[in-house]
Image: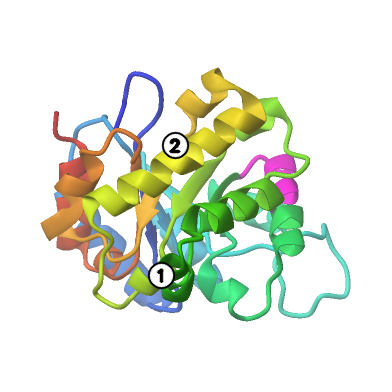
Amino acid sequence: MNRKYRKTVIAGNWKMNKTPSETKAFMNEFKTIMPKGRWCDVALCVPAVCIPAAVRAMRETRVGIGAENCNANASGAYTGEIAANMLVDAGCKYVILGHSERRAMGETDAEVNAKVLTALENGLVPILCVGETLEQRETGITNEWITMQIKSGLNGVAEDKIRKMIIAYEPIWAIGTGKTATAEQAAEVCTSIRTTVRHLYGARIARSITIQYGGSMKPGNAAELLAQPDIDGGLIGGAALKPEQFVDIINAANQE
C-alpha cells in the first residue's frame, strides 16, 4: 500500500449469497465490531435484492454499498437487467464489472468496457476485474493477457474519469479455490497493471489509482499481500461473508 498517493480500499463481493434478512443481520453484527479508524475505505458489494437492506443498515456509517454488475444501457427491453442509474438511486456507490465469473458466462471485453463507461457517467465507482487462467499463467502470458483486458476495459475512459476507478487483479485460478498467489506473484502483476496505466495516462494518474488483489485473500495472508507497495486493498469473496473475518482483513489494511 502507498497511502501517500492513493486510497486503500477493502471491498467485499458476496456473489450469490445471503437474503435481504440475512444481509440486515450481517450488517448489524458488522457494525458492532467494525474498526473505528479512518485509514482505509470499506465497501460491500451485494446481490441486487440485498442492496436496499444494506444501504438502510449502513446509512450512518462510512461503509459504501455496491452492486455486482450493471447493464450498459440506460433503459429498455432488457429483462432481468439493472441499469446504472437504478443502482445510484438505490444508494450504491460501487459496482463490480468484468468479474471472471461473468466473463465465463460470455461477457466480452467490449461489453465490460461499455459498462465501465456507463457506470462512470452515472457517478459510480467501477471495480474493473482482470485476471488470468492457470493455463495462461503457465504459458507465460499473464502480463500480456491482463494488459489487453485493461486496455479494452479502459477504452474511451477520459483522464478525469480514470482517477475514480479501481482495478482488481483476480487470478482466476485462485478465486474460490483456496489457492492464493504468493505476495511476490500478486505484487508483480499489480506493478505491471500500474505500468500499463502509466503508459496509457501518465505517471501521476498511475500513482493515484487503487489496485486491489482478489483471489482467496483472507485474514491469514492479508497483511503480507497488503504490504506490497502496488497492492492497495482487496476484493474479498468468502471472507467477506463472515463479519469477523472481514474485520480482520480491514484491520490488516489499517496497520502502519
Q: Main secondary structure of the magenta part?
A: helix
Q: Give 252 or 243, whichever is nearer the viewer.
A: 252
| Residue lying farthest to the left in this orientation | 220
Task: Mark yes or no: residue 195 visible.
Answer: yes
- The segment highlighted magenta reads 116-124
- Label 1 Cα neighbours within 10 Å, binned few <14 / some 14-19 / many ≥20: few
Task: Mark yes or no: residue 92 visible.
Answer: no
The disc placed on residue 138 is: 1
The amino acid type found where label 1 is placed reads: Glu
The amino acid type found where label 2 is placed reads: Thr
Secondary structure state at the residue bearing disc 1? helix
55 shown above or below 192: below
Q: Residue at x 58, y 49 (%)?
A: 147
Left-right relation of 246 to 55: left
The disc placed on residue 27 is: none
Quarter of the image where the N terminus is located: top left
Q: Residue at x 36, y 39 (%)?
A: 62
Name the residue that disc number 2 marks: 210
- Label 2 Cα neighbours within 10 Å, binned few <14 / some 14-19 / many ≥20: many
